[in-house]
Image: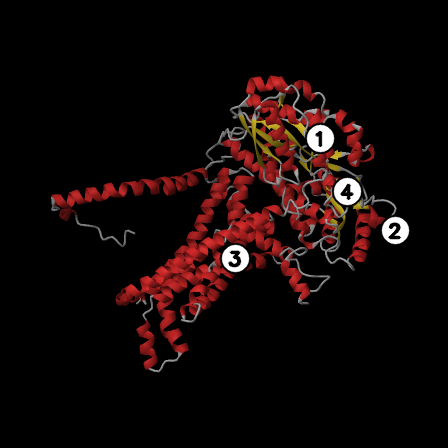
C-alpha cells in the first residue's frame, strides 16, 4: 500500500525538487545563524562560573622569580611541556601567571590545560591518558587520594626533589611516597572549614559560631527566616551536595564528626552504623528547609557563588573560597569569618583532608624540564604567593607560619588548623578508589534526595565490601 | 537477509559469460574500500567490545593484568543480571523515551501540518522552527540548566513575577522534577527534527488526492484521517524509529543536568561512568552489549510492526 505512494507522484518530481532546494537554502541560513547564536551562548556560558573568580589581591602580588633560573635555562631552554592544572575559582589564571613567569625565566614553554572541575572526572581523564601511555601530559595535578592508584605511571621525584621534600609536612610526604618512591610533590593542602556571616550572627543575637550541627541548623533557620523577608534567594546553609567527589568529602566530615567512623576503618566497612544513620537523616531533613532545594546539585563553585553573593548564612567549603569572599567583587567582604566545622552529639569537629600534589608522567618526553617546573611551583616563594593571593593552604611548615600568610588566611591559626583531619578511604580502596567514592557519593546523594539512611547504608556497605575483595 | 535473497542455482553461475564474470569482479573491487571501511569502523570495534565483555579488563591495566572471565560479567554474582543499578537505569531510559517520543511526535505532526499549508511567511516559519534543533545539545542543556535554576533561573523568576509560583516555596525543577525538566528540554530541542521528517513525508503526498476528495465532498477532518495519515505512515514509522533509538541512548542532556546523580542515570550514563569513572572496561563492555540488546528489542518491535503493516 505504501509502495504505491512512493512511485506515485513521479510527474510532480520537478516541483518537489524545487521545494526541497528552497528548504535546503533556508536550512543552511538557519544553520549559520544558530552557529553564531550558540557560539555566543557558549562564550557567555564560560564566563559565568568565574564571575567571582579573580581575587583582588592577586593583582598586587606577582609570581616570584624562578630560583637558579640561569642553570635551568642553559640545560632545558626551548623545551615544551604541558601542565594539567586547576579550574576551580580563579586558579586557572594563577596557573597561567606561573607558567608565564617560568617561561620568561627559563625558556621552557609551559602549555596550561585546566582539568575538569569535578575531581572524579579529572581522575578519569588522567587514567585514560596513562592507560594509553600518552606523552601529551608532562606535569599533572594529583589529588591527595590518587597516589596509590597512579604510582606506576609517575616518575620517582626523590632523586631530584628529595631534599626539598623535607621542608613539607611529613604526613603529606608519607601519603605521596608509594613503595619508597616519591611519586608526587605536595603543592597545597586542604581541609573543610565552616564559613559564617559574622554580621548576621550578631544581628540575630549570636556571639559565636555553632559548635554542633544541631546549633547550626537552629541558627541557620532563624537567620534564614529573618533574611527571607528582604531576600527571596536567601538560605541558611550551603555545601557540596552534588553526586561527585566533593560529597564524599562532606559526608565523611558529617559521619566522622558524629562519631560514626571513617566509612572504612582498618579495612572493614563501618559506614552502616547508628551514628552515621542519625547524622545523615538529620542532614536530609534540612534539605529545602535551611538549604536551597537544589543544594543536591552544588559543587564548590555553586557553593562559593551562593555564599559570596550574600545569599547564605553558613557554607562548608575549602580554604580557597576565603580569598574570593574577601575579594573586591564579594558582597560579604568584611562580613564573614571562618571556624572549624560543627560536630554531632557524640563526636568532635573534623576536617576532611584534601589537597593537591604535582606529579610528572612516566611517559613524558621532557621529564627533566617537567621536574624543574614542579620544583619551582612547590618552592617556598610560590607557596607563599599561592597562600597570600589565592588562600591555598601551604604544605611547607615554614610558609604556614609566615606572619603575612597567617594574617591573610585566618584558618591557618592554630585554633582552626589543629582540627583533627580525616582521610577518605583511599589506602584501602587503592586503584578502585574512584569506584568506591562513587558508591559513597551516589548513596549519600540518594539520602539527601529523600531516601532514608537505614535503606541506603546497607547497600553502600555491600558495594564497598565487593570492591575491597 | 537470507529469506530475501533467493539462492541462485549453481548451474546458472557456470553459464555466465566472461563479461558477466569480469563485471562481478569489478563490482567486488569497487565495493572493497567500502567494505574495508565498514569492517574498520563498525565490525572491529563491535567485535572488540564483545570480546572485552568476556574479560575483567580495567583502565589502569598495569595494576592488574587482564584475564578471560567468560560469562562472569553477565551472570556472575556481581554481573549485569543481578545489577539493580543497571535495571534502574533501563527504567529511567524507557520512561524518558516514552515521554519524549510521544510528545515530540504529536507536537511535531502539528507543526509539520501547519508549515505544510501555504501561508505568507511560510519560509521564514520553517527556518525559525529549526533553531532549537541546530543548537548543540550540550550548549542547549547548559543554557536550560541555568534557566531552570531555582535561585537565579529565569523560569522561576518569571513564574514568581507572574504570581504563578509561590515566592517562598517555589519548586526546584532539577531537584524535584528531574525527569520532567530533562524531557522538556529534549522535547523543545528535538520536536523540530520530527517536524522536518514528517514535513518531508507530507510533501510527497500528491495534491490531486485532496482535490478528488474535496470533489467527493470529504471535509478537512476526513481528508486528514483518510488520506494524510495513511499516506504518512512510512514517514511516521521512520521518524519513530529514529527518535526511539536516539532517546534510548540519551547521554548529553542527562550528563549536563545531573552528572552521576544516581536516581537519574540513563543506560548510557551508567555505562560511561562504569568505564571512564570506575575504569571497569570489561564490565562496561558487557553493559554496552546489554544496552545493544535492549535497543535491538525495540528495533525488532518496530520492524515487526512495519512488516505487519506492509502485508495489510
Whole-angstrom CA distance, mark 1 to mark 3, is: 46 Å
Image mark 1: chain: A
Discs 4, 3 touching: Cβ within 8 Å: no
Q: CA distance from mark 4 to mark 3?
A: 39 Å
Disc 2: CA contacts within 10 A as few (<14), some (14-19) or many (>=20): few
Front disc: 1 or 2: 1
Task: Give the mark nearer the N terminus: 1 vs 2.
Answer: 2
- Asked whether the beta carbons under mark 1 and mark 4 sit within 8 Å of each other, the answer is no
Q: Residues within 10 Å of mark 4 (few under 14, many from 20)?
A: many
Q: Which residue is mark 4?
A: A194
Question: Eyeballing the image, is A409 above or below A441?
Answer: above
When the figure is inspected, residue B182 is found, relative to residue A49, above or below; the finding is below
Q: Residue at x 28, y 51 (%)?
A: B2
Residue A357 lies in quadrant: top right
Q: Which residue is mark 1?
A: A385
Which chain does tag 4 point to? A
Residue A243: % across, % down: 63, 46
Q: Would you name the residue on which mark 2 appears?
A: A205
Q: Residue at x 47, y 48 (%)?
A: B291
Q: Secondary structure at mark 1?
A: helix
Q: Which residue is mark 3?
A: B186
Q: CA distance from mark 2 to mark 4?
A: 19 Å
Asked whether, in this view, residue A326 is left or right of residue A376, the answer is right
Image spot of residue B304 (x, y percent): 37, 60
Amino acid at each position: 500500500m505504501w509502495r504505491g505512494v512512493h512511485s506515485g507522484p513521479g510527474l510532480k518530481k520537478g516541483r518537489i525538487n524545487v521545494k526541497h532546494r528552497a528548504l535546503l537554502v533556508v536550512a543552511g541560513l538557519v544553520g549559520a545563524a544558530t552557529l553564531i547564536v550558540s557560539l555566543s551562548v557558549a562564550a557567555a556560558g564560560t564566563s559565568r562560573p568565574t564571575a567571582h573568580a579573580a581575587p583582588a589581591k592577586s593583582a598586587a602580588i606577582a609570581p616570584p622569580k624562578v630560583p637558579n633560573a640561569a642553570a635551568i635555562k642553559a640545560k632545558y631552554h626551548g623545551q615544551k611541556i604541558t601542565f594539567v592544572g586547576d579550574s576551580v575559582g580563579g586558579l586557572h589564571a594563577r596557573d597561567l601567571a606561573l607558567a608565564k613567569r617560568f617561561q620568561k625565566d627559563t625558556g621552557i614553554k609551559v602549555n596550561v590545560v585546566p582539568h575538569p572541575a569535578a575531581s572524579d572526572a579529572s581522575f578519569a581523564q588522567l587514567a585514560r591518558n596513562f592507560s594509553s601511555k600518552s606523552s601529551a601530559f608532562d606535569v599533572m595535578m594529583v589529588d591527595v587520594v590518587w597516589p596509590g592508584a597512579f604510582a606506576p605511571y609517575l616518575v620517582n621525584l626523590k632523586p631530584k626533589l628529595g631534599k626539598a621534600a623535607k621542608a613539607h609536612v611529613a604526613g603529606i610526604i608519607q601519603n605521596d611516597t608509594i613503595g619508597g618512591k616519591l611519586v608526587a610533590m605536595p603543592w597545597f593542602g586542604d581541609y573543610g572549614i565552616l564559613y559564617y556571616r559574622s554580621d548576621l550572627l550578631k544581628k540575630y543575637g549570636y556571639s559565636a559560631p555553632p559548635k554542633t550541627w544541631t546549633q547550626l541548623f537552629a541558627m541557620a533557620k532563624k537567620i534564614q527566616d529573618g533574611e527571607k523577608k528582604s531576600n527571596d534567594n536567601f538560605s541558611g546553609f550551603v555545601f557540596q551536595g552534588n553526586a561527585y567527589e566533593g560529597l564524599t568529602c562532606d559526608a565523611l566530615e558529617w559521619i566522622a564528626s558524629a562519631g560514626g567512623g571513617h566509612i572504612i576503618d582498618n579495612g572493614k566497612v563501618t559506614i552502616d552504623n547508628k551514628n552515621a544513620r542519625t547524622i545523615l537523616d538529620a542532614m536530609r531533613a534540612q534539605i529545602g528547609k535551611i538549604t536551597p532545594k537544589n543544594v543536591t546539585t552544588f559543587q564548590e563553585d555553586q557553593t562559593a557563588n551562593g555564599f559570596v553573593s550574600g545569599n547564605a548564612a553558613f557554607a562548608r567549603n575549602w580554604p580557597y573560597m576565603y580569598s574570593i569572599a574577601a575579594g573586591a567583587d564579594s558582597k560579604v567582604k568584611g562580613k564573614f569569618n571562618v571556624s572549624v566545622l560543627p560536630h554531632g552529639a557524640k563526636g568532635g569537629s573534623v576536617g576532611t583532608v584534601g589537597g593537591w600534589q604535582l606529579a610528572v608522567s612516566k611517559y613524558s618526553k621532557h621529564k627533566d624540564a617537567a621536574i624543574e617546573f614542579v620544583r619551582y611551583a612547590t618552592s617556598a616563594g610560590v607557596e607563599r604567593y599561592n597562600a597570600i593571593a589565592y588562600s591555598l593552604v601551604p604544605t611547607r611548615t615554614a610558609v604556614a607560619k609566615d606572619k603575612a600568610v597567617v594574617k591573610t588566611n585566618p584558618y591557618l591559626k592554630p585554633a582552626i588548623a589543629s582540627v583533627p583531619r580525616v582521610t577518605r578511604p583511599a589506602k584501602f580502596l587503592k586503584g578502585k578508589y574512584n569506584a568506591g567514592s562513587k558508591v559513597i557519593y551516589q548513596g549519600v546523594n540518594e539520602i539527601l534526595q529523600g531516601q532514608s539512611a537505614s535503606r541506603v547504608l546497607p547497600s553502600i556497605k555491600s558495594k564497598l565490601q565487593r570492591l575491597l575483595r | 537477509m537470507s529469506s530475501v535473497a533467493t539462492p541462485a542455482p549453481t548451474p546458472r553461475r557456470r553459464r555466465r559469460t566472461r563479461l558477466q564474470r569480469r563485471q562481478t569482479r569489478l563490482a567486488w573491487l569497487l565495493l572493497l574500500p567500502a567494505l574495508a571501511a565498514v569492517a574498520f569502523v563498525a565490525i572491529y570495534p563491535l567485535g572488540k567490545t564483545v570480546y572485552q565483555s568476556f574479560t575483567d579488563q580495567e583502565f589502569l591495566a598495569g595494576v592488574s593484568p587482564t584475564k578471560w572471565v567468560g560469562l562472569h560479567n553477565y551472570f556472575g554474582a556481581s554481573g549485569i543480571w543481578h545489577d539493580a543499578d543497571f535495571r534502574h537505569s533501563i527504567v529511567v531510559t524507557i520512561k524518558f523515551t516514552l515521554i519524549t517520543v510521544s510528545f515530540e511526535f504529536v507536537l511535531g505532526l502539528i507543526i509539520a501540518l501547519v508549515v505544510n499549508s501555504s501561508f505568507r511567511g511560510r519560509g521564514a516559519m520553517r527556518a525559525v522552527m529549526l533553531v532549537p534543533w541546530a543548537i548543540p545539545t550540550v550548549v542547549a542543556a547548559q543554557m536550560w540548566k541555568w534557566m531552570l535554576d531555582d535561585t537565579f533561573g529565569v523560569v522561576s523568576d518569571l513564574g514568581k513575577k507572574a504570581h504563578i509560583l509561590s515566592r517562598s516555596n517555589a519548586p526546584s525543577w532539577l531537584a524535584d522534577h528531574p525527569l520532567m525538566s530533562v524531557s522538556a528540554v529534549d522535547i523543545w530541542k528535538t520536536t523540530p527534527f520530527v517536524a522536518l521528517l514528517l514535513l518531508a513525508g507530507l510533501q510527497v503526498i500528491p495534491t490531486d488526492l485532496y482535490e478528488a476528495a474535496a470533489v467527493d465532498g470529504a471535509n478537512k477532518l476526513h481528508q486528514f484521517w483518510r488520506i494524510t495519515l495513511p499516506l504518512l505512515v512510512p514517514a511516521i514509522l521512520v521518524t519513530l524509529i529514529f527518535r526511539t533509538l536516539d532517546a534510548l541512548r540519551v547521554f548529553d542532556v542527562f550528563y549536563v543536568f545531573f552528572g552521576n546523580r544516581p536516581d537519574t542515570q540513563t543506560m548510557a550514563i551508567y555505562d560511561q561512568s562504569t568505564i571512564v569513572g570506575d575504569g571497569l572496561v570489561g564490565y562496561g563492555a558487557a553493559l554496552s552489549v546489554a544496552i545493544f540488546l535492549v535497543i535491538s528489542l525495540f528495533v525488532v518491535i518496530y520492524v515487526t510492526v512495519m512488516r505487519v503493516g506492509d502485508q495489510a
